[in-house]
Image (spheres, rainbow, N blue to C red):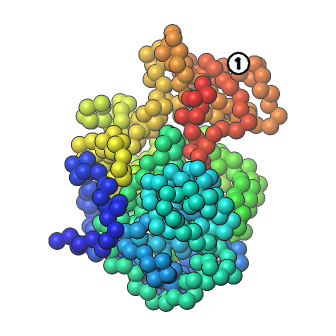
Amino acid sequence: MTTPSAQTDRYVHDRLPPREQWPEFRYDLPELQVPDQTNVVTALFDAARANGWANRLLLRAPGETYTYAEAEAQVGRMAEMLIKDFKLEPGNRVLLRGGNSIGMALAWLAVVKAGLIVVPTMPLLRAVELDKVIDKAQPALALCEVALLKDMVQAAQDAKGKLPVIAFGDPKRADGVEQRAARRSPDYPGCATAADDIALLAFTSGTTGVPKAVVTTHRDILAACNAWPRHVLKMTPDDIVTGSPPLAFTFGTGGLLIYPMWAGASVYYPDVRFNPETMVRKMRDNGITVCYTAPTFYRQMAPYAQALGIPSLRICVSAGEALPDATRQLWKQATGIEMLDGIGGTEMWHIYISSAGAEVRAGTIGKVVPGYQAKVVDENDQEVPRGTVGRLAVIGPTGCRYMDDERQTKYVSNGWNHPGDAFIQDEDGYFHYQARDDDMIITAGYNVGGPEVEDCLLTHPAVAECGVIGKPDAVRGMIIKAFVVLKPGHPDNEAMVETLQAYVRDSIAPYKYPREIEFMAALPRTDTGKLQRFKLRGMA
């Protein structure tokens, strides 16, 4: 019998899609079973104590550390503060605004432990963008890092109802989170949520323009801990993790908070915004063993990694966008490490196709993660023969539920999740990424994946970054257009255009060469590093 919900505020529950539009959830492996009464934060701290990790470091930053026991105590104080200081009730939404910091991590854990629904927001969002999140999520409270208060306060003033904003990150601030929490009990038990109560309302990063609110439960997160982290990542309590994905993004929440907690590892949050050189230096100086970032950043870090060395590093996770094989090989040459690629998404919480170590095969993302099933289907959801391009369909212990969004039926069909990616699955079960569904370029009857052309261009010594899209054309239907960022010292002239076009024609099928090349100083990307191809298409 399913445990009754503890969330008395039903705002999000009442805006879930109809049950017939939900994906099917499968828990085929014993380790994916989650007790019907579970709070993910309480469960993670309980496991830490049971495994003897209480006195091991969990959170690290310059000049500040928290052991598991210290973090649990502070999370308890903050959770009680949220409930008693602000009279919040389980199911209320709490908006978080902050960078990758100990304060942001503790706030995330406290909100969820209290039975509230965390609504993390990217630190680079401005007031007008926060307005949209507030309007949809209807939070009862906002917790905001001191340095980011300006836009948060403006957004709170813009809100239709009164939205209190409480600052964190300044222990001396009398009305701040730290001073308020200090008056509360470290032993606060939290909320005895049902596993199917909602922990997270995650807004998509907006690569397609209009963000969507994705609902994630306590069960989703705990089940996912026993899928990719257990079977592919294989962290240990001795690992120290860092990376660039924001904690507000599920890639960052999983990789830089939840999964290290599940493994008994620790996380390092820097006191500066990473650039390629500082990230390499921070990893080297802090004994980092596991790194998360996007392919573009690995490519930019490679020369510094080769010059400076990162002897402690052992696992490098790439996700967020397609990993060109040229980038994989460049990083391997610089560090000796075979990159761990993966594809996941906010709708599915985290990674569901990936391979590591000896299982890695060049040119593929990997195989389906144990606990999930995946197939490549046609427009009628029928599986296509191996070696044929089609749409990816995934099913497993996590799945898409949008809050109050008609796009639910586009993502979920016949119980399967359709992330919007074109793939080929080979005879050995490996998945070869082709493009986003809307990034597939059909030119003169040929299907061309933009990432394949990007991968080719990136192997040219003059190219630093590139993005490839299809541009409408009266004769060919579409032509291939490349937006290219050149490395310093290379001229952005017509001769370079011809050089790059010839290079692609000589390297891959001639019909795949870009008929137009436009040079740029930088490519448009989201806060999480994803290339915004919809902006490139708009420019074209």
Residue 68, image x, y percentages: 52, 82
Q: In which quarter of the image is residue 428?
A: top left
Residue 484 x, y percent position in the rendering: 68, 31
Figure check: 69 above or below 427: below
Mark 1 = which residue?
498
Q: Looking at this view, is 371 or 428 the one in front?
A: 371
Residue at coordinates 51% horizontally, 45% vertically from top-left?
Answer: 206
Quadrant location, the C terminus: top right
Is 532 located above or below residue 91 in the figure?
A: above
The disc labelled 1 sits on which kind of residue? Glu
Asked where in the image residue 164 lies, by quadrant, the reply is: bottom right
Q: Which SS class for mark 1?
A: helix
- Crowdedness near tag 1: few (<14), some (14–19) or many (≥20) residues, C-alpha within 10 Å: few
Is 21 positioned to the left or the right of 221 in the image?
Answer: left
Residue 272 visible (yes or no): yes
Q: What residue do we see at 67% from left, 76% from top? A: 170
| Left or right of residue 123, residue 19 in this image | left
Can residue 224 be seen at all in this image of the molecule?
A: no
The correct choice, above or below, for 494 with respect to 174 in the image is above
